[in-house]
């Protein structure tokens, strides 16, 4: 009896640990075919070794004729890992495949997910910590302004609560509706001039349309600066995502109406944001590649003969990389480049004469985040961001570094 045949016999008898040893021995002996990989992946799944099973199914889906069976089981693995969005994307694609057997299996799995979704429940997250900001004014170091230094230590807090209202859908769709409220507060040590606070309330609906996962939501946000109203913002959020091979493609559109406080009425207006992303699995890591465009139409700032545009067209690429270094430690790296071209030329006095010049900025930044899990609900989080902005107007050139250490809690 070959190791593969012994593995099949052990699997059928329910002895998955023995089956795994035999399938691994078959691989060590040089066997490599779809049947062996499929049985190896199934055995790992039965042993609840979901990361290892996922890696094998990802390899298998690249083989001719195996994409459907692999995606079906990758959907089951995503559901076991409570990644319901990923599970719905995968299983929805299989539910629209050419194989009637796979369509039935995927539809049954989707209905089982729908039936197993819990009653309305609450999820909560909070973090608080201390940090240091090297340039909270975001201005050139060459400028000399009255008042405290640009650098300052700070304390901040962020908390959010998500309430799932209900789930809807039948054989044709899986959906949910939830509401989220959040609060952010930052208090600088040096003075109160740039102390910030913000609250938001968002409602969203998620459902499936064939192989797409579609999200439609609305959000209200209000922010203050030094205890004075900075802005109130009303946004519509539209998100569509679908599986493309082993990766996930996502399109986001977010139009917003902004009503600024009386001190900042030059920020009144509209903002349109469009974002394209592709999430690519890399073994135990995930890479997200994206491009974002933001169009602003603001009131702008006028004082006498001087004029300053507040309506930039921003665009640029970004990437995000996430990896678990071990069971308790994870790393996230974010980096982006953004070019901002302001709609109208600024007009301002310089050396006794009126100067006209358009503002064009090029911002590059990188974020590093380490998270250490202390307990199921608790973690330590270390963040560092380096930003470098280059502008056609020297006063907007700046370098900024922000570092913080936070305690996180999840429920």
Image (cartoon, helix red, strand yellow):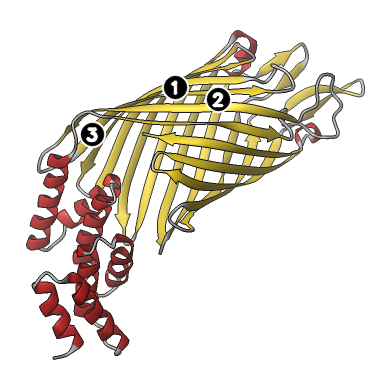
Dot 2 or dot 3, earlier in sequence: 3
The mark lying in front, picked from 2 and 3, is 3
Whether residue 361 appears in this view of the structure is yes
Q: Provide the residue designation for mark 1.
A: 200
Q: CA distance from mark 1 to mark 2?
A: 22 Å
Residue 311: % across, % down? 61, 27
Q: Secondary structure at mark 2?
A: strand
Considering only vertical position in the picture, is 43 above or below 6?
A: above
141 or 271, nearer to the observer: 141
Dividing the image into 4 quarters, which one contains the C terminus? Answer: top left
Q: Secondary structure at mark 3?
A: strand
Q: Which residue is mark 3?
A: 176
Q: CA distance from mark 2 to mark 3?
A: 34 Å
The earlier-in-sequence mark between 3 and 1 is 3
Q: Nearer the viewer, residue 124 or 167?
A: 124
Which mark sits nearer the N-terminus, 1 or 2? 1
Q: Is residue 205 left or right of residue 198?
A: left
Q: Residue at x 27, y 75 (%)?
A: 63
How many numbered marks have been drawn onto this rendered protein structure?
A: 3
Quarter of the image containing the N terminus?
bottom left
Q: Where, by quadrant of the figure, is residue 355 drawn?
A: top right
The percent position of residue 91, horizontal first and vertical second, equals 20, 53
Q: Residue furthest top?
A: 262
Q: Residue 297: which numbered mark, if any?
A: 2
**Mark 2 near mark 3, Cβ–Cβ under 8 Å?**
no
Query: Going 80% across and 26% down the picture, which residue do you hit?
Result: 149
Q: Nearer the viewer, residue 120 or 356?
A: 120
Q: Is residue 195 left or right of residue 45?
A: right
């Amino acid at each position: 009896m070959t190791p593969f045949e012994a593995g099949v016999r052990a699997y059928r008898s329910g002895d998955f640990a023995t089956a795994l040893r035999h399938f691994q021995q078959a691989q060590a002996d040089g066997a490599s075919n779809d049947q062996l990989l499929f049985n190896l992946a199934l055995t790992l799944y039965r042993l609840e070794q979901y990361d290892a099973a996922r890696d094998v199914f990802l390899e298998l889906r690249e083989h001719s004729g195996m994409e459907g069976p692999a995606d079906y089981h990758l959907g089951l693995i995503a559901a076991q890992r409570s990644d319901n969005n990923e599970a719905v994307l995968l299983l929805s694609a299989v539910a629209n495949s050419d194989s009637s057997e796979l369509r039935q299996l995927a539809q049954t799995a989707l209905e089982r997910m729908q039936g197993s979704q819990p009653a309305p429940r609450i999820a909560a997250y909070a973090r608080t910590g201390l940090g240091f900001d090297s340039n909270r004014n975001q201005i050139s170091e060459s400028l000399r302004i009255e008042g405290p230094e640009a650098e300052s230590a700070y304390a901040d807090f962020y908390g959010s609560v998500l309430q799932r209202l209900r789930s809807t859908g039948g054989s044709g769709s899986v959906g949910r509706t939830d509401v989220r409220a959040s609060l952010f507060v930052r208090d600088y040590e040096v003075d109160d001039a740039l102390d910030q606070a913000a609250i938001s309330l968002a409602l969203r609906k998620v459902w499936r349309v064939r192989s797409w996962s579609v999200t439609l939501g609305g959000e209200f946000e209000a922010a203050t600066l030094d205890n004075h109203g900075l802005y109130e913002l009303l946004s519509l959020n539209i998100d569509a995502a679908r599986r493309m091979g082993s990766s996930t493609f996502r399109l986001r559109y977010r139009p917003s109406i902004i009503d600024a406080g009386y001190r900042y009425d030059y920020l009144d207006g509209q903002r349109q944001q469009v974002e394209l992303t592709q999430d690519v699995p890399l073994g135990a890591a995930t890479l997200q590649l994206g491009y974002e465009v933001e169009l602003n139409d603001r009131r702008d700032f006028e004082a006498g003969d001087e004029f300053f545009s507040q309506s930039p067209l921003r665009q640029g690429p970004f990437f995000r990389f996430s990896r678990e270094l071990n069971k308790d430690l994870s790393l996230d790296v974010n980096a982006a480049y953004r070019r901002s071209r302001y709609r109208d030329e600024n007009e301002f006095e310089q050396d006794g004469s009126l100067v006209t010049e358009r503002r064009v900025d090029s911002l590059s930044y990188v974020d590093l985040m380490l998270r250490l899990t202390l307990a199921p609900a608790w973690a330590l989080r270390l963040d560092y961001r380096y930003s470098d902005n280059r502008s056609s107007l020297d006063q907007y050139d700046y370098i900024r570094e922000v570092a913080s250490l936070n305690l996180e809690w999840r429920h």
